[in-house]
Image (tube, rainbow, N blue to C red):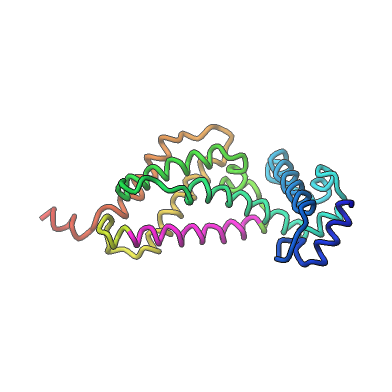
Amino acid sequence: MSDEADACGDAAAGGSSGAGGSVSARGRATRARLLAAARTAILEGDGTVEVAAVARRAGVSAGLLYRYFTGKDGLVAAVVDDFYDGYDREVFATRLDGALSWPEREHARLRREIDFLCDAPLGRMVIGRRLCERAAAQTDAQRLAGQIDLAARSIAKAQREGELDGSFSPRFAAAATLGAFRELMAEALSGDADPPRAELLEAMWRVGSSLLLHSPASESSSSR
């Protein structure tokens, strides 16, 4: 069976664009091949992507690509989502030693996050904002919101356990620290030089610890 025929079968099942339903193994392989071709095209084109070029690279027709993705926006969004799936697995889903304190776990996680973003081929495209597509920005914002949710829950738990200053809203703290981190990494990844990872870690740790580890009330009382 051809890729085109397989895609037609997937579309009839309601699953060709990832919206649910059953997708054949051949269909999944074709979709994966298109994603891989799109990633390569984005990297080689320094953030630009064209549907026809991706289809040629994957060895399929442009019409077939549209059966798996809702055009260029759907393809770009899928590439960014795939990047974030790996990001979340490597950085947020990995559990550290429970015997460590929250600051120790967070410092180790932050180091791993910086390493991941500096090493990931798409790190400069997505986080460094070279992938200048509307769908990329929209998907990036959605995934960042999900990371803020995770960070807020982690901060709230540490506040309940007395490890962090409880005078600050967990969600505001998460948004402030992740916002600062994203701007820091956008600047670090905007050029072609290898980012100074130790310097980035130190800068971000100072920002986060000044917000989360020191209570304004305790500092004012100690200064009297």
Left or right for 182, reference 222: right
Viewer-proximal residue among 223 and 105? 105
State the residue at coordinates (79%, 66%).
Answer: 13
Query: 146 above or below 56?
Result: below
Where does the magenta region start and end?
A: 136-157
State the residue at coordinates (42%, 45%).
Answer: 109
Left or right for 199, reference 158: right
State the residue at coordinates (62%, 39%).
Answer: 121
- What residue occupies the far left of the structure in this picture? 224
Q: Where is residue 160 in the image (x, y as percent from the top left)?
A: 28, 63
State the residue at coordinates (83%, 58%).
Answer: 7
Q: Main secondary structure of the magenta part?
A: helix
Total numbered badges shown on the rendered structure:
0
Q: Where is residue 125 in the image (x, y as percent from the top left)?
A: 62, 45
Q: Quadrant of residue 21?
A: bottom right
Viewer-proximal residue among 188 and 24? 24
Left or right for 169, reference 216: right
Residue 139 highlighted magenta (yes or no)? yes
Q: Where is residue 115 in the image (x, y as percent from the top left)?
A: 49, 38
Q: Position of residue 81 (x, y in %)?
A: 62, 54
Quarter of the figure that contains the C terminus: bottom left
Query: 221 above or below 202?
Result: below
Residue 215 highlighted magenta (yes or no)? no
